[in-house]
Amino acid sequence: MKGKVAIVTGASSGIGLATVKEFASRGASVVLAARNTSKLESTVQELNSQYGKDVNGKSRFIAVTADVSKEEDCKNLVAKSVEHFGRIDILVNNAGISMRAMFKDLDLSVIRNLMDVNFWGTVYCTKYALPYLLEAKGSVVGVISIAGFKGLPARTGYSSSKFAIYGFLDTLRIEHLHDGLHVMVFAPGFTTSNIRNVALTADGSQQGETPRDEDKMMSAEEVASRMAKGIIKRKSQIVLTPIGNLTVWLNKFFPRLVDKLEYNYMKKEPNSPLK
């Protein structure tokens, strides 16, 4: 990745932050995008002190405050990236939010919110970065989930947005089959991050704490390492964790069995809305 320029959305924490650090360690210049300006700037300072400037004397890292649910923010993110670095080689659409509630109890604004951030954020950023990615024969990555292959109960909005991202990127890959564009759908399983802490409940408020044992999950750093390797090898699809791969494989042949296994698995969460 030496000499490459990458944009990472959702870069202030979790998989996004780990991805920024992984790319930096591999020699890439990185544009950090998220809503939390102070966290972004703190990370940029840390990276600048650790890695210094590029061969042209420019900082290898810049922070751009962006809410990816807003088209203008995404347009500005790409413009700032090109203004500073002159190119874009990699776009990682990582920004996302989750939810946990039964659809029958759900305020529809929650699904709109998830689609705006998860799906439209991916569409907006990809649209404005695409000319530069095509010029560089670069990579666009969509971070989805196992929920993008198999619907998760009490996660209708989350699963819908991730299925939508999968369909969008799968189609984009085919459209540019002969243009040298690399498109990768990247699906971590349960990963240590704060996404469950800030997941939305039925009324749109944050649930405030994770219902899972985070210590038993794949680390964000391991996920970032796998992503970097996938980009270098120009993989079209990566599914992480043994349970994630098993779920995707079983669902191809025994979908009704997976329905039952999923339901029973998810209802074991503390305070699960499933009965």
Image (spheres, helix red, strand yellow):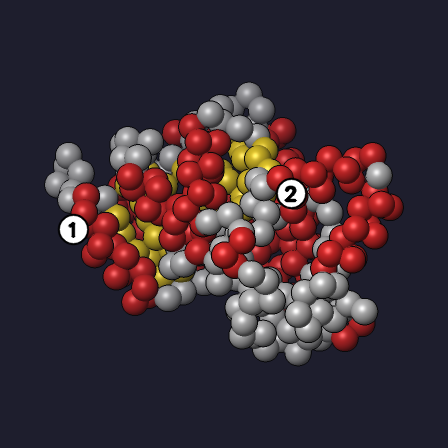
The spot of residue 146 in percent (x, y) is 65, 46
Query: Sequence-wise, which precedes: disc 1 or disc 2?
Result: 1
Which residue does the numbered mark 1 point to in the structure image? 49
Q: What is the distance, in whole Å, between disc 1 and disc 2 at their CAs?
A: 37 Å
Name the residue at 27% across, 32% down: 3
The spot of residue 193 in percent (x, y) is 48, 58
Disc 1 secondary structure class: helix
Crowd rating for badge 1 (residues with CA inside 10 Å; few <14, some 14–19, many 20+): few
Name the side, left or right, on which 112 lies relative to 80: right
Disc 2 secondary structure class: helix
Determine the residue located farthest toward the right in the rendered image: 256
The spot of residue 135 in percent (x, y) is 40, 29
Determine the residue located farthest toward the top in the rendered image: 178
Is residue 234 in view?
yes
Name the residue at 16% across, 43% down: 53
Which residue does the numbered mark 2 point to in the structure image? 244
Name the side, left or right, on which 115 lies relative to 64: right
Is residue 127 in view?
no
Q: Amino acid at mark 1?
A: Ser
